[in-house]
Amino acid sequence: MNRRHTVPFALATAIATALVVAACSFALLFWQFCADLDQHVRPAQVRSSRMVDAVFAELAAGSRFAQALYRANPDCAALNPRLAEWEFVHPFVSVLLVGDRDWQVQCSNYKTGTVWRMDPRPDNSFTVLYPKQPPAQPAQGLALLSHTSVGDGLTVKTSVPLAAVTLLLDNAENDLFEHQLLIDGVLADNGVAAAPTAPDEMVWAHSSPRYPYTIRTLLSADNRDELFISQSHHTLLALALLSLTTGGFAYVWLRRSLGIEEMLQRGLRHDAFEPYLQPIVDGRDGRPVGAELLMRWPAAPEHCRGPDVFIPPAEQSGQIVPMTCAIMAKLEVALMDRRLPSGFYLSVNVVPALLNAPAFHARCASLAARLAHDNARLVLEVTERQHASLGTLPPAFTELLDRYRITLAIDDFGTGRNNLSTLYDSERVSVLKIDRSFVDGHRPGDDNPLLDAVIMIGRRMGLALIGEGVADEGVRAYLLALGVHYHQGFLYGHPVPVPVFLGQLDTHVLSTDEAALPAFSPRFEHSIPIY
């Protein structure tokens, strides 16, 4: 991706990331809000239902009381005060009427002389009488919830204003909800069938198990959103900040990642990558047996200079192939007029992308042919950051290994994606490099079962073992005590430019920042048996 496209791409990706985080967070928050709302409304409906049940029960009880009272004494002059007293004690009941078989009112809790008429109703029924209906009512203009009882030539009706019943409905602590009372399937407010609800409207319904009514609670989409915002505005603000922060991190990460890729491209164009060598020695006497080729980027900005920073993006983008070929070519040029000790070897790190790269095959062939002039060898170290199936190597790569007697090694065994099956898949592996994490901080006599297992596996398979990360005498002594004789680490030498390394070979000295190692004269018997 070229530089002018980097910022728009990073910005677009950051915005998309922020929107995805915001959408997912909002959806989760809204789902939780609806779940909490459901847990709040349903118990409120049950509480309301208990109170409405009490109204229905008092209406039925009033009918039974008036009927029994009239049977005992049909004298309305004496009966009316008793009915008025019962109404006073039971606040849910406002009207008690006793009529004959022709539905003519005989007694009531109202003043004598008032003439009422009752419409025929089924026995033991609950109905709603509306102001515009023909039956005369004690309180004109009010809808009444009534109970009718019929028997033995008597008709008894008890009523309560419907407004008093609907006031008992729990409004869930705010006025955004609409509450409906349905009696026998019709709305008690107007006597018509309940209209179907809108698709985006939230509806809760609770039917009484004892009486013919249903309490229905509705919340429109607009009121739902208003309630959601009012209850969640602090959380929504936090989610907005989270989304912006996530988008910002995505932008910074992409700018840095894409920026490194751009710098890698510029580094390739300007041939900025340099080969460095770090010695691999026999830990018993410090004599070198080989060296590992490492890539460095001296001209890079400070924050990109470390190999752990620029190597991973190079592998991901595929630029590791031309970068590796470039430092191998430089190494070969540096070796043009030099001789290496007999039996010496040079190792090169290999990632899966290199196994199928013809340019890398050509560089390996050229470097292996050059090393053969000094009786030296080329070893390819398969790194574990990415999985590489050594049992099914590309035919071109296999032919390269056979023709130039190139050996394979497993680098940092046990810490990456390769595993025991990698060893069993390929008989070409001859060297096993033990990662520093297995030996860091250990001293002679320490119990280290993982390292013991790695050493046992390597020996049983006839592999040469190299301990990595040897930085002090304690680790050196620890590896030697376990029979691991070949070491690599800062104790023996830091990675240095190829001319510096070759100069150290010429003067028989390999130095570190801490100490100088003994003078060295190369001997074939100190070589690692890699063939």
Image: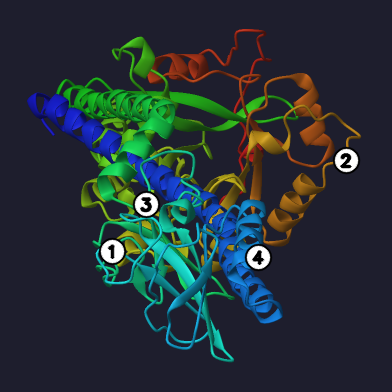
**Frontmost residue, 356 versus 128:** 128
Q: In this view, does 344 lie to the left or right of 243?
A: right
The kind of residue on which mark 4 rests is Ala
**Frontmost residue, 28 versus 479:** 28
Residue 243 in the image: state x and y as whole percent. 34, 30
The numbered mark, 3 or 4, whose residue comes first in the sequence reads 4
The CA span between labels 3 and 4 is 107 Å
Please state, as top left, top right, bottom left or bottom right, where the C terminus lies in the image: bottom right
Which-is-in-front pick, marks 4 and 2?
A: 4
Instruction: Tell me if mark 1 has few (under 14), some (14-19) or many (20+) residues whose alpha carbon lies within 10 angstroms of its own.
Output: few
Which circle marks residue 422 in the picture? none
**Which residue of the protein is positioned furthest toward the left in this rendering?**
4
The CA span between labels 2 and 1 is 87 Å
The CA span between labels 1 and 3 is 78 Å
The kind of residue on which mark 1 rests is Asn
Residue 499 in the image: state x and y as whole percent. 39, 16
The kind of residue on which mark 2 rests is Asp
- Report helix, strand or loop for mark 3: helix
Q: Are marks 4 and 1 in contact (CB under 8 Å)?
A: no
Residue under circle 1? 190
Residue drawn at (34%, 67%), measured in percent from left and top? Answer: 136
The CA span between labels 4 and 2 is 106 Å
- Report helix, strand or loop for mark 1: loop
Residue drawn at (29%, 56%), measured in percent from left and top? Answer: 201
Please state, as top left, top right, bottom left or bottom right, where the N terminus lies in the image: top left
Q: Are marks 3 and 2 in contact (CB under 8 Å)?
A: no
Which circle marks residue 78 in the picture? 4
